Image (tube, rainbow, N blue to C red):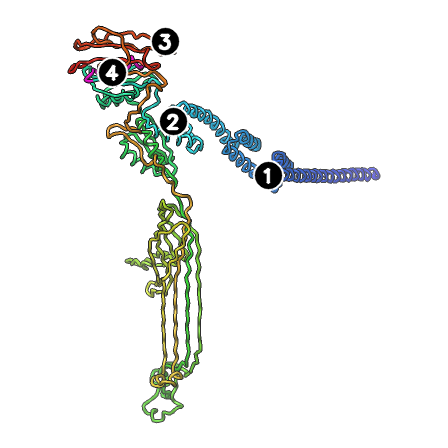
C-alpha cells in the first residue's frame, strides 16, 4: 500500500511537468509566429513603400500612389508611410490641378479634362477638379454662343449679337474672347450710332415721308401697309392727333421714332414685326414699359459709392446692396441697365499699388575728452576733544567733544581732515561713430496709408491712489506704452502719367532721461523727437533722399582751482577740462515702384450718350440715311406732294377720292415681272382731288411708291 501511495503522486507530478513544458513550448511558438508575421509585414510594407517612391520618381503617379496606399494598409501604424502618402498625394493633386487650369486657359479642353479626371481618380471628392470639369462644360457652352455671336456680326445684326453675348460675360466676366467681341461690338455700334433693340429687316426699309397736318392713325396705317409692320395703338391714343413730317430715305424705325417724339408717344416692340404705341404718361409708362433686373458683382469698387452714383445719375429707385457678396442688384429699364453696365465697368477697376523701398540711416558721431588734473573741490576740518557730555552714551555723538578749555591745547594731532585729500589725473579721449540702418520695403494701395514702426514700446506705469474712510487707500495701476524709435507714415497717390505723389510723415524719437516720481513710486520718461512732414512727387523708380535732420550738441565743462587755475600757462596744472560733442543726422531715402498701372480708359467708356432728362437712352436720337437701291428689303416712299414729271411714270387717272395702294410683293416673289398695285379707298375729312399712282415697273427692285396730293390748308 505504501508503494502505491508513493507512485501516484509521482505520476501526477510527471504529467504536470509535461503539460507545463508543452505550454511553454506553445507560447514560444506563438511568439515566434507573431514576430515572423510582424517581420513579414514590415518587410512587405517597406518593399511597397520603396516601390511606390520609385514609381513616383519615374513619373508613374497613379501606380506610385497606389503602392504607397498598399504600404499604409500593410503597416497602418507606420507614421512615415502615412506622411509620405499624404505629402505625395497632395503634391500630385496640386500639380494636376495646375496642369488642368493651364490647359483650359490655353484652349485645350481635352487635355484639361484628362488632368481633372486623373485628379478624381486619386481623390474622388476633390471639389476643385469637379469645378474644373464644370468650367469646361461652361466653356463649351460659351464657345457655341460665341460662334453664334460671330455669325450675327457677319450678318450685321450688332444689337442681337450684343444681347447674345451678355450671358457669357455674366457667367465669366473675364472671358478674353468674349471681352474682345464685346469691344468690337461696342466700337461698331458706336460707329453706326445705332439705338434700340434688335429689329427685323422690315424696320430697316428706307422710306420717304411728306405729310402736313396729317391724321396720326392714317400715317401709321400707311406705314403699316407699305412696310408690312403691324402697328397697334393704345385705346388712349387721341384720335385727333396730327403730325407733320418731311423725311427722305430714312428707316421705318426712325420714322416711327420721329412721329412718336412729336406726339409724346412711346413704343414697345412686341415681336420682330409688331409695334405697340401708347401715350407717354406716367401711368402708361408704369404699366407698359418693360424692366430688367441686373446683378453687378463688384471686384474693386465700393458698392455704397456705386449706389450713390446710380441713384444720382440714372435716378434708379429699385436698387439693393448686398455687402456680404459686395454686389449691387438693380431693377430698371433696359436702357438704364445698359448705362449702368458702362458706368460700373468704368469705375470697377483695380487700384494700382506702390512698392516703396525705404532706407533710413541715422549717423551718430560722439567726441568726448576729459583732460587735466582733478583737484579736491573742498575739505572739512574737525577738532577732536576728550570731554564727555552729560547724558551722552559711549560711542554716540557727543561722547567726545571739544571743550573751550581744550582749544588751548589744539594742534595738528587734534584736527581731522575729511574727506581724504586726493588728486586725479584725467587723460581720456572718446570718439565713437554709430550708424543705424533700417531698410524696410512696404507695399501700399493707391491713396491708402501705410505705417512703419522700428523701435521699442516703452511701458509707462501710472498709479492712482483712492483714499477710503477706513483702512489702507486703494492704489490702481495703469500701464501705457509709448512708441520710441522710427515711425514712418506714407500715403501714395498714383497719377496717370506714371508719377507718384507720396505724403511722408517721419518721426525719430529716443529716451533722453528717466523722470522718477518719488511719491507714487512710478517712472516717467523724457522723450526727444525729430519730425519731418512733406509731400513728394516722384517718377516710377526715382530715388529721393531727405537729409538735414541734424542735431548738433556741444558741451564743455572746466573745473579749476580759483586763482591758480586761471593762470595763462600754469592754469592747466590746476584745472580739469571735459568736452562732449555729439552730432546726429538722419537720412531718409525712398524709391517708389508702381505695381499694376492705372488703366487708361477708352474714349468710348469716358463719353457716351445717356438720353434726355426724362428718357434714358444709350445712344443719341439720330437718323441713319438708307439707300433705297441697295437696301436688302423693299423700300417704301409715302409722299404728300404733287407728282412731278421727274417722278416715276403713273397711269392716267381721273380725279377721285384719295386712295392708298397696299404693298406689292418683290419682283423675285411675284408671278409677273411688273406687279400692279391694288388701290384701297381711304376716307378723308374733306373731298379733294387725289392721284394714286403705282409705277412699280419703272421703280427700282422691290420698291413701292405711294403718292398723295393734299390741297393747301386741308389736313388728312
- Whether label 3 touches label 1, CB < 8 Å: no
Pointer 2: what residue?
162
Pointer 3: what residue?
673
User: Vertically, is 408 above or below 91?
Assistant: below
Magenta-tinted stretch: 212-228
Mark toward the start of the polypeptide (2 vs 4): 2
- For image coordinates 38% across by 27% down, the residue present is 162
Pointer 1: what residue?
85
Q: What is the secondary structure assignment of the residue under circle 3?
A: loop
Q: Viewer-nearest of labels 2 and 4? A: 4
User: Dot 1, crowdedness within 10 Å: few (<14), some or many (≥20)?
Assistant: many
The CA distance from mark 2 to mark 4 is: 36 Å
- Of the 4 image quadrants, the one containing the N terminus is top right
Q: Viewer-nearest of labels 3 and 4? A: 3
The CA distance from mark 3 to mark 1 is: 84 Å
User: Dot 3, crowdedness within 10 Å: few (<14), some or many (≥20)?
Assistant: few
Please tell me whether residue 219 belongs to the stretch shown in magenta. yes
**Secondary structure mainly formed by the magenta segment:** helix
Q: Viewer-nearest of labels 2 and 1? A: 2
Q: How many marks?
A: 4
User: Vertically, is 332 above or below 693?
Assistant: below
Q: Nearer the viewer, residue 464 or 489?
A: 489
Q: Quadrant of residue 635?
A: top left
The CA distance from mark 1 to mark 4 is: 87 Å
Pointer 4: what residue?
639
User: Vertically, is 640 above or below 357?
Assistant: above
- Whether label 1 touches label 4, CB < 8 Å: no
Q: Position of residue 242 (x, y in %)?
A: 19, 17
Mark toward the start of the polypeptide (3 vs 2): 2
Q: Residue furthest bottom?
A: 408
Mark toward the start of the polypeptide (3 vs 4): 4
Amino acid at each position: 500500500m505504501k508503494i502505491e501511495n508513493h507512485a501516484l503522486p509521482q505520476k501526477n507530478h510527471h504529467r504536470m511537468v509535461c503539460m507545463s513544458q508543452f505550454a511553454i513550448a506553445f507560447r514560444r511558438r506563438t511568439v515566434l509566429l507573431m514576430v515572423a508575421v510582424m517581420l513579414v509585414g514590415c518587410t512587405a510594407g517597406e518593399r511597397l513603400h520603396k516601390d511606390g517612391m520609385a514609381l513616383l520618381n519615374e513619373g508613374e503617379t497613379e501606380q506610385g500612389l497606389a503602392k504607397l496606399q498598399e504600404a499604409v494598409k500593410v503597416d497602418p501604424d507606420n507614421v512615415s508611410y502615412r506622411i509620405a502618402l499624404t505629402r505625395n498625394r497632395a503634391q500630385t493633386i496640386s500639380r494636376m490641378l495646375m496642369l488642368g487650369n493651364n490647359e483650359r486657359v490655353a484652349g485645350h479642353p481635352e487635355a484639361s479634362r484628362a488632368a481633372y479626371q486623373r485628379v478624381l481618380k486619386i481623390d474622388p471628392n476633390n471639389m476643385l477638379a469637379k469645378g474644373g470639369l464644370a468650367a469646361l462644360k461652361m466653356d463649351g457652352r460659351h464657345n457655341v454662343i460665341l460662334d453664334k455671336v460671330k455669325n450675327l456680326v457677319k450678318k450685321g445684326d450688332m444689337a442681337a449679337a450684343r444681347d447674345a453675348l451678355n450671358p457669357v460675360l455674366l457667367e465669366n466676366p473675364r472671358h478674353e474672347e468674349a471681352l474682345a467681341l464685346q469691344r468690337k461690338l461696342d466700337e461698331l455700334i458706336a460707329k453706326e450710332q445705332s439705338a434700340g433693340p434688335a429689329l427685323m429687316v422690315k424696320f430697316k426699309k428706307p422710306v420717304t415721308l411728306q405729310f402736313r397736318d396729317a391724321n396720326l392713325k392714317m400715317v401709321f396705317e400707311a406705314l403699316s401697309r407699305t412696310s408690312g409692320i403691324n402697328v397697334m395703338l393704345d385705346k388712349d391714343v387721341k384720335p385727333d392727333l396730327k403730325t407733320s413730317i418731311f423725311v427722305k430715305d430714312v428707316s421705318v424705325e426712325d420714322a416711327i421714332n420721329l412721329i412718336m417724339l412729336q406726339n409724346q408717344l412711346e413704343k414697345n416692340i412686341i415681336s420682330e414685326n409688331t409695334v405697340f404705341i401708347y401715350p407717354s404718361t406716367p401711368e402708361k409708362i408704369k404699366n407698359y414699359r418693360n424692366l430688367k433686373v441686373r446683378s453687378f458683382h463688384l471686384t474693386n469698387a465700393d458698392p455704397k459709392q456705386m449706389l450713390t452714383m446710380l441713384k444720382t445719375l440714372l435716378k434708379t429707385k429699385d436698387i439693393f446692396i448686398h455687402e456680404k457678396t459686395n454686389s449691387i442688384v438693380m431693377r430698371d429699364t433696359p436702357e438704364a441697365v445698359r448705362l449702368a453696365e458702362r458706368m460700373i465697368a468704368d469705375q470697377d477697376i483695380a487700384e494700382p499699388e506702390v512698392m516703396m523701398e525705404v532706407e533710413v540711416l541715422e549717423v551718430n558721431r560722439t567726441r568726448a575728452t576729459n583732460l587735466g588734473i582733478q583737484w579736491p573741490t573742498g575739505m572739512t576740518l574737525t577738532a577732536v576733544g576728550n570731554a564727555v557730555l552729560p547724558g551722552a552714551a559711549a560711542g554716540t555723538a557727543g561722547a567726545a567733544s571739544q571743550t573751550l578749555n581744550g582749544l588751548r591745547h589744539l594742534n595738528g594731532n587734534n584736527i581731522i581732515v575729511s574727506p581724504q585729500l586726493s588728486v586725479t589725473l584725467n587723460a581720456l579721449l572718446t570718439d565713437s561713430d554709430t550708424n543705424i540702418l533700417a531698410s524696410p520695403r512696404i507695399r501700399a494701395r493707391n491713396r491708402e496709408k501705410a505705417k512703419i514702426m522700428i523701435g521699442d514700446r516703452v511701458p509707462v506705469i501710472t498709479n492712482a491712489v483712492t483714499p477710503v474712510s477706513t483702512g489702507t487707500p486703494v492704489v490702481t495701476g495703469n500701464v501705457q506704452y509709448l512708441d520710441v524709435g522710427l515711425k514712418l507714415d506714407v500715403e501714395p497717390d498714383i497719377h496717370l502719367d506714371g508719377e507718384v505723389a507720396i505724403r511722408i510723415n517721419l518721426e525719430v524719437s529716443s529716451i533722453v532721461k528717466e523722470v522718477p516720481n518719488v511719491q507714487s513710486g512710478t517712472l516717467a520718461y523724457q522723450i526727444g523727437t525729430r519730425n519731418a512732414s512733406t509731400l513728394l512727387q516722384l517718377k516710377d523708380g526715382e530715388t529721393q533722399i531727405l537729409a538735414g535732420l541734424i542735431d548738433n550738441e556741444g558741451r564743455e565743462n572746466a573745473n579749476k582751482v580759483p586763482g591758480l587755475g586761471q593762470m595763462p600757462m600754469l592754469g592747466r596744472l590746476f584745472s580739469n577740462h571735459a568736452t562732449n560733442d555729439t552730432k546726429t543726422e538722419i537720412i531718409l531715402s525712398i524709391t517708389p515702384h508702381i505695381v499694376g498701372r492705372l488703366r487708361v480708359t477708352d474714349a468710348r467708356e469716358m463719353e457716351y450718350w445717356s438720353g434726355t432728362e426724362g428718357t434714358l437712352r444709350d445712344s443719341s436720337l439720330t437718323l441713319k440715311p438708307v439707300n433705297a437701291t441697295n437696301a436688302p428689303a423693299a423700300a417704301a416712299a409715302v409722299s404728300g406732294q404733287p407728282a412731278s414729271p421727274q417722278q416715276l411714270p403713273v397711269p392716267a387717272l381721273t380725279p377721285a377720292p384719295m386712295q392708298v395702294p397696299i404693298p406689292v410683293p418683290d419682283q423675285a416673289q411675284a408671278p409677273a415681272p411688273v406687279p400692279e398695285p391694288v388701290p384701297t379707298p381711304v376716307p378723308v375729312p374733306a373731298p379733294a382731288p387725289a392721284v394714286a399712282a403705282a409705277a412699280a415697273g419703272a421703280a427700282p427692285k422691290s420698291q413701292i411708291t405711294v403718292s398723295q396730293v393734299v390741297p393747301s390748308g386741308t389736313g388728312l
